[in-house]
Image (spheres, grey):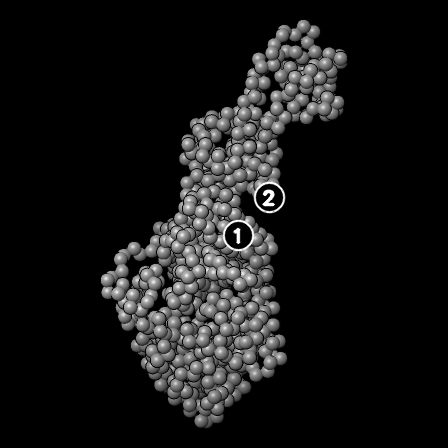
C-alpha cells in the first residue's frame, strides 16, 4: 500500500437542484460542467451569468475604495502644480506591473513621474527609510506606493514630517496600527466598505488609474492580468473580470516589451492562457527581483525601443534560467537534510541564494506535507531565509511565540521570512517540535487536495477536456478541475528528463481503456507503478503533436491499494538502490553477503518468527526487504502475514547460486571423485580456484560437492586439506541432508527468482 502524498478531499455528492438543472439545460451547459459549477457554489441565474460572462461593466466604482477620493484629489493637485511624483513599488511581478500601470496613467495625465523598485537584498520589502530620505533630497514632492506601504510606518512618518505626502495603495495584510500616510487605498481598509477584498496590488493600482482617468483604461488590462495571476490571489469576482479581459488584451497588445517576453517564454500570443502567464511569463518577471535589481523590468514593460525590449527580455530569460538552476541545486542538497522525525522541518545550508529560498521551502513542503523553514548562513553569525506552511499550522502564530529568538521576523499564516542567530537554530527546532505536540496539531494527514469528480478512463475525451474551458480562467478560488481515476494498472512506464526526474506513463483499466499520464517530479517513484490497483489524481489536458490531439493527465498525486511488491532481483534493478531506516531487511543466511548489508544496513538475521516480530515492532518500519532466499518459500508468506506489512521488497540474493549451478551432475561428481582418488591430498583452502578450473566446475558448486562428500564421510577435511577416506561406506548422494536441502533450495529459487511479479503477488496474498 502506498498512501497518497496529499489528503484527498472527495467531491460533494449532493444532487443538483431541479431549478439548477433546468438553468444549465437552458444555457446549453454540459451536465458534468454543471456539477463543477454547483460544487463551486455557482447555483443561481445571477451567479451563473456573472461567472460565464465576466463583463467590465460589472466592475465596482473605484471611489468605493476608502480614501480614493482623497488620493485622486492629491495626485491631480500634484500634476497641476508640476510636483515631482515618485511611484514606489515592489520587486515581484505584482509590484512591477502595479508600478507600470500607475506610471503610464500618470504620464497620460501629464505628470512628472519617476519610479523605484527596491532591491530585495539592499533595501528589503516595503518603504525603506534611507531610500525615502534619498528621494526626498533629490526633490520628490509626492510618494505613491503600489503593492506595499501598509507596514511602512517609519519611512512614511519621516516623509510626512518633511512635508512630503505619501499615498499608500496596497493589498497586503493590514497591521493593527496603520501608518500615518496622507491616504491609504486598500480593498480591506477597516474603515472602508469595498465589495471585493481580494484585489492584487496591480488591481488596486488599476482602480486608482480608473479613478484618475474617470474611465476603464483597456490598454492597461494586459498588465493587470499578469500581476493578478502572478500574485495568486483569488480569481473570483472582480479578479475574474480583470483577468478574463486582460488575457484578451494580451492577444492584441502592441506592448513591445511584453511581446518580446512572450516570445522568449515560448508562449503563443494568440492562444495565451492564465497557465502561460503563471508558468512562463510571471516566473521571468519574478526572477529578476529574486536575484538582481528589478527596475529594468519596468523599463521592459514601458519601452518603445524594439532593440531594448529584445535585449531586456533575453536578460530576464537568462536570469530565470539561473534562478531555476539555483533552486534545483539547493533542492538536491536540502532534501538530504530533512529529518523525518521532526514535525516542522528546519533546513539550513551554506551559501544558498536567499532570493530563491521561499521557492525551495514551498517545494519541500509539498514533498513532505510538513511546514518547512529554509535558511542560509550569512556573515555576522546569522541565518536568513523563508518558511512555508500547511493549512493545519499557522506558521506566523507559532513563530510569534518564539520571536525572542529572532533578529527579525514577519509574514502571515502560510509564509514567513526571518533572520536568526546561528547559535539559536537547535533551540528553534526543539521549540517548533514542542509547539506542535503541545498544541496537539495533527500534521499526519497531509496537505488537502480537492477532487472535483471521479471519472473512468472511458469518460475521457477531447470534447470533455475542451468543455472545461467554459470555467476558465483558472486560479485560486476557481482551480483547474482535478479528477480521480481508480483501480488502474500500468501498461507502460518510463523515466524522462535530464536526470530521470519525471515519469511518462500509459495507464489502463480492466476494460483496456488507456490514458497517457505525465508525472513531473515523480521519477524517483517509478518503482511504485510496477503494481496494480493504482489511483491517480490530476488535471486533464490535451497533448497536441504533429496535428494529432490526445487526452493526457497531468498527475498531481497517486496511491496504491493493497499489497505492493517491489522487484530488486536483478542487478540492474538494484543499481543505486539503498533502503532507508524505515525498511527492515531480513536475511536467511547466518553470514549475510556484503551486497545485502549495503542494500539494507538495518538488517535482521532470521532465527524465529517471534524474534522477528519483536524486532519489527521495536522499530518504525513500514516496509520489509527479503534480502536472500529461504530454503522454504512458505516462511516468506508466514512473515508477511505475521507482520501485516503491505510493502515488500524482493531482493532475493542467491549466495550459493543453487538454481544456477544445480546439485551437480553424475559426470561432475565422477570427475571430482576420480581426482580425489588420484591425489594423496588436496589443498581446498588455497587451491580451490585451481581445482575448479581443472575440473571445469563453478567454484560455488565445487564447494557444495565437497561438503556433500564430507557429510557422507567419503572424504575428511582438516586445516583446509582434503583427504579421501580409505574405506567409506556406500551412500547415495540423496542421503546427504545438504544435498536434500540443495534440491529444495533449487525449487525455491526457481519459483522466487524466475516467477514474474504478478505471480508472486498472487501466491503471496492467496
- Along the viewing direction, whichever of 197 and 765 lies nearer the viewer: 765
**Res 708 → quadrant:** top right
SS assignment at label 1: strand
- Along the viewing direction, whichever of 475 and 470 lies nearer the viewer: 470
Q: Name the residue: 68% across, 9% down.
A: 725
Looking at the image, is 493 positioned above or below residue 619? below
Q: Position of residue 374 (x, y in %)?
A: 51, 58
Q: Nearer the viewer, mark 2 or mark 1?
A: 1
Q: Name the residue: 26% across, 57% down.
A: 15
In the picture, the disc for residue 503 is: 1
Q: Position of residue 758 (x, y in %)?
A: 48, 37
**Res 460 → quadrant:** bottom left
Q: Position of residue 4 (x, y in %)?
A: 42, 49
Q: Name the residue: 53% across, 27% down.
A: 748
| Dot 2 and dot 1 residues touching (CB under 8 Å) | no
> Relative to residue 741, is residue 228 drawn left or right?
left
Name the residue at the left extreme. 18
| Total labels drawn | 2
Give the crowd class for mark 2: few <14, some 14-19, many >=20 residues within 10 Å. few
Looking at the image, is 699 positioned above or below residue 398? above
Q: Name the residue: 57% across, 64% down.
A: 323
In the picture, the disc for residue 576 is: 2
Q: Sequence order check: which comes first, mark 2 or mark 1? A: 1
Name the residue at the top extreme. 727
**Res 598 → quadrant:** top right
Looking at the image, is 196 positioned above or below residue 383? below
Q: Where is residue 305 in the image (x, y as percent from the top left)?
A: 59, 82
> Relative to residue 671, is residue 52 drawn left or right?
left
- Residue 673 visible somewhere in the drawing: yes
Please state, as top left, top right, bottom left or bottom right, where the C terminus lies in the image. top left
Please state, as top left, top right, bottom left or bottom right, where the N terminus lies in the image. top left
| Disc 2 to disc 1, C-alpha distance | 18 Å
Amino acid at each position: 500500500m502506498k498512501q497518497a502524498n496529499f489528503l484527498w478531499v472527495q467531491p460533494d455528492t449532493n444532487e443538483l437542484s431541479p431549478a439548477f438543472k433546468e438553468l444549465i439545460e437552458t444555457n446549453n451547459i454540459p451536465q458534468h460542467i454543471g456539477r463543477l459549477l454547483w460544487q463551486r457554489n455557482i447555483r443561481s441565474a445571477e451567479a451563473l451569468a456573472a461567472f460565464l460572462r465576466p463583463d467590465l461593466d460589472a466592475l465596482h466604482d473605484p471611489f468605493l475604495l476608502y480614501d480614493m477620493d482623497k488620493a485622486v484629489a492629491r495626485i491631480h493637485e500634484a500634476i497641476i502644480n508640476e510636483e515631482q511624483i515618485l511611484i514606489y513599488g515592489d520587486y515581484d511581478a505584482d509590484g512591477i506591473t502595479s508600478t507600470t500601470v500607475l506610471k503610464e496613467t500618470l504620464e497620460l495625465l501629464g505628470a512628472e513621474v519617476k519610479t523605484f523598485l527596491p532591491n530585495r537584498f539592499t533595501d528589503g520589502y516595503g518603504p525603506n527609510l534611507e531610500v525615502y530620505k534619498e528621494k526626498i533630497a533629490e526633490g520628490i514632492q509626492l510618494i505613491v506606493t503600489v503593492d506595499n506601504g501598509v507596514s511602512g510606518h517609519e519611512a512614511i512618518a519621516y516623509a510626512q514630517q518633511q512635508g512630503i505626502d505619501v499615498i499608500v495603495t496596497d493589498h497586503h495584510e493590514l497591521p493593527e496600527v496603520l501608518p500615518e500616510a496622507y491616504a491609504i487605498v486598500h480593498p480591506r481598509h477597516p474603515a472602508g466598505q469595498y465589495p471585493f477584498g481580494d484585489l492584487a496590488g496591480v488591481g488596486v493600482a488599476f482602480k486608482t488609474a480608473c479613478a484618475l482617468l474617470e474611465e476603464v483604461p483597456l490598454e492597461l488590462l494586459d498588465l493587470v492580468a499578469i500581476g493578478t495571476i502572478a500574485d495568486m490571489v483569488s480569481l473570483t469576482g472582480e479578479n475574474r473580470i480583470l483577468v478574463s479581459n486582460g488575457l484578451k488584451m494580451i492577444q492584441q497588445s502592441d506592448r513591445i516589451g511584453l511581446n518580446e517576453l512572450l516570445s522568449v517564454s515560448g508562449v503563443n500570443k494568440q492562444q495565451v492562457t492564465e497557465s502561460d502567464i503563471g508558468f512562463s511569463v510571471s516566473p521571468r518577471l519574478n526572477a529578476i527581483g529574486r536575484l538582481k535589481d528589478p527596475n529594468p523590468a519596468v523599463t521592459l514593460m514601458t519601452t518603445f525601443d524594439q532593440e531594448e525590449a529584445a535585449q531586456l527580455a533575453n536578460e530576464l530569460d537568462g536570469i530565470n534560467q539561473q534562478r531555476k538552476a539555483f533552486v534545483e541545486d539547493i533542492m538536491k542538497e536540502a532534501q538530504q537534510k530533512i529529518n523525518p522525525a521532526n514535525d516542522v522541518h528546519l533546513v539550513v545550508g551554506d551559501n544558498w541564494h536567499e532570493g530563491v529560498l521561499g521557492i525551495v521551502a514551498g517545494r519541500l513542503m509539498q514533498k513532505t506535507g510538513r511546514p518547512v523553514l529554509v535558511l542560509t548562513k550569512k556573515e555576522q553569525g546569522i541565518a536568513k531565509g523563508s518558511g512555508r506552511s500547511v493549512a493545519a499550522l499557522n506558521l506566523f502564530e507559532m513563530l510569534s511565540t518564539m520571536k525572542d529568538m529572532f533578529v527579525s521576523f514577519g509574514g502571515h499564516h502560510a509564509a514567513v521570512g526571518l533572520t536568526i542567530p546561528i547559535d539559536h537554530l537547535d533551540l528553534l527546532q526543539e521549540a517548533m517540535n514542542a509547539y506542535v505536540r503541545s498544541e496537539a496539531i495533527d500534521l499526519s494527514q497531509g496537505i488537502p487536495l480537492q477532487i472535483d469528480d471521479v471519472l473512468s478512463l472511458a469518460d475521457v475525451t477531447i470534447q470533455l477536456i475542451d468543455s472545461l474551458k467554459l470555467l476558465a480562467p483558472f486560479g485560486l478560488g476557481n482551480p483547474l478541475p482535478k479528477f480521480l481515476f481508480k483501480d488502474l494498472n500500468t501498461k507502460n512506464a518510463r523515466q524522462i528528463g535530464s536526470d530521470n526526474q519525471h515519469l511518462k506513463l500509459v495507464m489502463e483499466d480492466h476494460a483496456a481503456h488507456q490514458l497517457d499520464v505525465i508525472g513531473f517530479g515523480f521519477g524517483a517513484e517509478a518503482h511504485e507503478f510496477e503494481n496494480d490497483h493504482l489511483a491517480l489524481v490530476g488535471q486533464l489536458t490535451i497533448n497536441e503533436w504533429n496535428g494529432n490531439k490526445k487526452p493526457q493527465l497531468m498527475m498531481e498525486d497517486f496511491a496504491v491499494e493493497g499489497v505492493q511488491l517491489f522487484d530488486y532481483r536483478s542487478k540492474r534493478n538494484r543499481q543505486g538502490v539503498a533502503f532507508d531506516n524505515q525498511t527492515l531487511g531480513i536475511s536467511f543466511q547466518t553470514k549475510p553477503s556484503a551486497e545485502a548489508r549495503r542494500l539494507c544496513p538495518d538488517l535482521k538475521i532470521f532465527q524465529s518468527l517471534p524474534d522477528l516480530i519483536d524486532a519489527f515492532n521495536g522499530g518504525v518500519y513500514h516496509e520489509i526487504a527479503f534480502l536472500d532466499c529461504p530454503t522454504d518459500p512458505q516462511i516468506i508468506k508466514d512473515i508477511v502475514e505475521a507482520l501485516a506489512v503491505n510493502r515488500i521488497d524482493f531482493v532475493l540474493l542467491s549466495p550459493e547460486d543453487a538454481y544456477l549451478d544445480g546439485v551437480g551432475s553424475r559426470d561432475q561428481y565422477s570427475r571430482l571423485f576420480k581426482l580425489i582418488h588420484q591425489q594423496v591430498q588436496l589443498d581446498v583452502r588455497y587451491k580451490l580456484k585451481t581445482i575448479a578450473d581443472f575440473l571445469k566446475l563453478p567454484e560455488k558448486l565445487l564447494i557444495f560437492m565437497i561438503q556433500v562428500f564430507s557429510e557422507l564421510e567419503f572424504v575428511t577435511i582438516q586445516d583446509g586439506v582434503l583427504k579421501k577416506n580409505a574405506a567409506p561406506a556406500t551412500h547415495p548422494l540423496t542421503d546427504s541432508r545438504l544435498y536434500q536441502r540443495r534440491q529444495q533450495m533449487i525449487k525455491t529459487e526457481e519459483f522466487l527468482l524466475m516467477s514474474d511479479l504478478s505471480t508472486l503477488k498472487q501466491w503471496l496474498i492467496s
